[in-house]
Image (spheres, grey):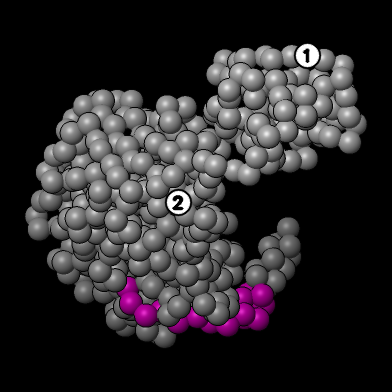
């Protein structure tokens, strides 16, 4: 048994020596007693006699020691030198963390050690040794082995703008969390601070982004345990959470959400303090649909704080209200509407939400084209920019708020194709879905086994309608309106006419629509 223990010890130490010894850049600890400053743990001196001035020392507490590595690294092993002139048994119950991730091996034993190497195999930058018992924490040297990473393990860092928080106390303004000062001592003016409440902090990325990771730096000079029950949200949707009886120094949270507004929300009543919030991911390039349709006039249910309806199609897509780019109604079941230059097939509608505040107001609404609903949105969260599929024919675009709150739109963009009011007589207009609930062609002119395009054209010419529809292979229907249920692909109109197999007569609940040609009857 003794030989086995010796063999394992040798293997771990050989493996550690095969990796690069990594360097620390800066450190601090929960407290300092008897002159045992944190820097002693990486001064290159492995003397295990406290009197030689080579060991750290905290007060008798569940304390910690931490140090930042000079760059991101994969830390494979951590080697700790214990004090030996006395008190070795104090270091017998502790955990090791790297960026909030516990290394694979913690330590708890009634026996003390002299020098011990621990496996870690984690990626990060901040190493923390946390005491789990109320004793002074003393380490005479901490050595780490592994490999530096080329670049950042989390990807590109996204710049954050326009922060806000639920309240501000002790001068801890929200901007401290995005000022690139990641010092974790409050006295360095690097940390935010709210009042004692279930508070929140938020900021937004420069543009719509795929947010992969959110990295949070906790306050460490005191009160670290306050940050132990919170959620992280992107555009109002939860992407990560943390709840623990313990605390962390630095922790990276996987997020994987597309949005723009990042919120950290406290789930308990305590001051919310963040020393830095770093967001990693990449910007999302919005694909611009083809054929943007111009809006020419607008109106809305009411106007408040000068948020006129024209702001929603002035070409200014800024989500910041203070840049005069957003509309605003009174707090009501309001609406906004605008008119296209001409009747069109509206394929998509893109809406830009307000982000400097109040984004959650726009989370329950419907979109209609000439009174026909083409899309709706209802969520406990919100969005930054969202594109809605529509596929309706008409000229009047309307957004109806379904809850009593101000309706604010920073930009509305409409995409599709113009539908000319006068098309060459007999011209094929397109294929369109039909609905029993809201039919385009309720008037059935004829069902016939010899149905063809010419016959239906003349039937509808006599009725004085502008268009006719062939459906199901043998039906002729007359009307003046179409497209309320969306446009289908031309290949969906593949049923041959019962009276002429060389002609198409729509599909199952799909109309093949043609312009009436009175000259051929």
Which numbered dot is residue 332?
Answer: none
Q: Residue at point 73% right, 62% down?
A: 4
Q: Nearer the viewer, residue 118 or 97?
A: 97
Residue segment shown in magenta: 13-27
Which residue appears farthest toward the bottom when viewing the image?
44
Is residue 9 at all visible to an observer of this figure? Answer: yes
**Residues packed near mark 1 inside 10 Å, few (<14), some (14 to 19) or many (20 plus):** some
Rendered location of residue 250, percent (x, y): 38, 60
Rendered location of residue 318, percent (x, y): 29, 58
Which residue matches tag 1? Answer: 447
Q: Is residue 172 above or below residue 388?
A: below
SS class, disc 1: strand
Is residue 250 at all visible to an observer of this figure? Answer: no
Which residue matches tag 2? Answer: 293
Q: Is residue 38 above or below residue 52?
A: above
Rendered location of residue 413, percent (x, y): 41, 50
């Amino acid at each position: 048994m003794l030989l086995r223990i010796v063999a394992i010890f040798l293997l771990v130490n050989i493996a550690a020596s095969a990796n690069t010894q990594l360097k620390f850049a800066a450190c601090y600890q929960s407290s300092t007693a008897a002159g045992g400053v944190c820097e002693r743990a990486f001064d290159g001196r492995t003397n295990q006699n406290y009197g030689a001035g080579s060991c750290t020392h905290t007060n008798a507490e569940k304390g910690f020691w931490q140090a930042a590595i000079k760059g991101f690294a994969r830390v494979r092993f951590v080697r700790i030198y214990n004090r030996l002139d006395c008190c070795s048994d104090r270091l017998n119950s502790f955990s090791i963390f790297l960026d909030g991730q516990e290394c694979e091996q913690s330590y708890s034993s009634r026996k003390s050690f002299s020098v011990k190497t621990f496996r870690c195999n984690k990626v990060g930058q901040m190493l923390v040794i946390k005491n789990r018992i109320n004793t002074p924490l003393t380490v005479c040297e901490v050595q780490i082995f592994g490999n530096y990473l080329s670049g950042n393990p989390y990807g590109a860092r996204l710049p954050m703008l326009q922060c806000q928080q639920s309240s501000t106390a002790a001068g801890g303004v929200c901007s401290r969390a995005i000022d690139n000062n990641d010092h974790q001592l409050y006295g360095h003016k690097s940390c935010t601070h709210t009042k004692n409440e279930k508070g929140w902090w938020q900021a937004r990325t420069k543009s719509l982004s795929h947010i992969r990771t959110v990295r949070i730096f906790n306050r460490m000079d005191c009160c670290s345990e306050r940050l132990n029950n919170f959620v992280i949200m992107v555009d109002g949707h939860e992407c990560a959470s943390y709840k623990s009886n313990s605390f962390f120094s630095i922790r990276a949270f996987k997020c994987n959400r597309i949005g723009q507004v990042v919120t950290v929300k406290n789930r308990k009543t305590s001051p919310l303090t963040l020393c830095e919030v770093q967001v990693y991911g990449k910007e999302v390039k919005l694909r611009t649909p083809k054929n943007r349709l111009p809006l020419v006039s607008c109106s809305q249910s009411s106007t408040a704080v000068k948020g006129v309806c024209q702001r929603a199609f002035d070409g200014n897509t800024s989500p910041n209200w203070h840049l005069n780019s957003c509309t605003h109604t009174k707090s009501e079941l309001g609406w906004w509407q605008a008119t296209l230059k001409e009747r069109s097939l509206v394929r998509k509608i893109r809406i830009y939400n307000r982000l400097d505040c109040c984004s959650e107001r726009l989370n329950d609404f419907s979109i209609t084209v000439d009174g026909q609903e083409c899309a709706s949105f209802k969520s406990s969260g919100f969005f930054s920019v969202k594109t809605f599929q529509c596929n309706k024919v008409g000229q009047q675009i309307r957004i109806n708020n379904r809850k009593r709150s101000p309706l604010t739109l920073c930009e509305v963009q409409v995409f599709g194709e113009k539908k000319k009011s006068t098309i060459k007589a007999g011209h094929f207009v397109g294929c369109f879905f039909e609905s029993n609930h809201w039919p385009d062609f309720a008037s059935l002119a004829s069902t016939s086994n010899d149905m063809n395009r010419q016959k239906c054209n003349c039937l509808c010419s006599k009725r004085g309608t502008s268009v006719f529809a062939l459906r199901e292979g043998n039906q002729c229907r007359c009307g003046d309106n179409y497209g309320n249920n969306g446009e289908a692909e031309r290949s969906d109109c593949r049923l041959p006419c019962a009276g002429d197999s060389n002609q198409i007569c729509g599909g199952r609940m799909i109309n093949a629509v043609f312009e009436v040609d009175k000259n051929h009857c």
